[in-house]
Amino acid sequence: MPKYYSKVKPELVSDISQTDMFQYVSIPECLKGKTFIVFDLETTGLNSSPASGSIDSIIEIGAFKIVDGEICESFSTFINPQKKLSEEIISLTGITDAMLENAPKNEEVMPDFFKFCQGNILVGHNAANFDFKFVDYYCSKLGYTLERKIIDTIPLAQELLFLSNYKLNTIADHFKISFNHHRAIDDAYVTAKIFLELIKIKKSLPKLQ
């Protein structure tokens, strides 16, 4: 039975790179029969822990669903943090107060994002130490418990690649993937592509974090 989304509805994704008739043959067995949610956030700052003071707010969520090794759905939205953005965040992300003015609020978005993620393995770049903490906090505030099943592409890339650093753009350059960095939907898409490439190299799933 399809899930009911009240505010943010996932959209079908058609990735032209997946239309190759030989593509499915190259998908590692460990990806088949499994669903992954690759996600990324933009936030008002770096404080992901209420123990360190007032936790920062999410201003954009970007996520892609991978089923049987293929990217098939996206989830994307701005979130109105109900406060002004700093000049640093505006400069870093290109997101402005005007872009968020009519966006849904956190309590409208997180129930739908929880439904999108529920029961699936989460994947992200530095997700275990950063992004998941925000999602977990804001979901739990609304009474939703998101199961911690995370694959982080940073330690996965460190295990498999020899690079000068393991920033998202450096790994993307290694795989010749271009993108608009520091926007959640673009970062999530590139992370999904990188995740698939890394699993093709490893041919097995890493330990969940």
Image: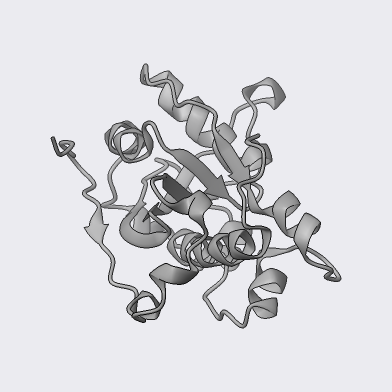
x and y percentages locating residue 89 in the rendered image: 58, 58
Relative placement, left or right, of 77 versus 49 is: left
Residue at 48 percent of width and 64 percent of height: 27
Residue farthest top in this picture: 143
Seen in the picture, residue 22 relative to 161 is either above or below; the reply is below
Seen in the picture, residue 201 relative to 145 is either above or below; the reply is below
x and y percentages locating residue 207 in the rendered image: 67, 38
Seen in the picture, residue 4 relative to 80 is either above or below; the reply is above
The answer to whether residue 191 is visible is yes
x and y percentages locating residue 151 in the rendered image: 60, 44
The answer to whether residue 40 is visible is no
Residue at 62 percent of width and 36 percent of height: 208
Relative placement, left or right, of 15 versus 155 is: left
Q: Quadrant of residue 34?
A: top left
Q: Work out which quarter of the rendered image holds the C terminus and state it.
A: top right
Q: Work out which quarter of the rendered image holds the N terminus and state it.
A: top left
What is the total number of numbered labels drawn onto the structure image? 0
Relative placement, left or right, of 121 versus 67 is: right
x and y percentages locating residue 122 in the rendered image: 50, 42
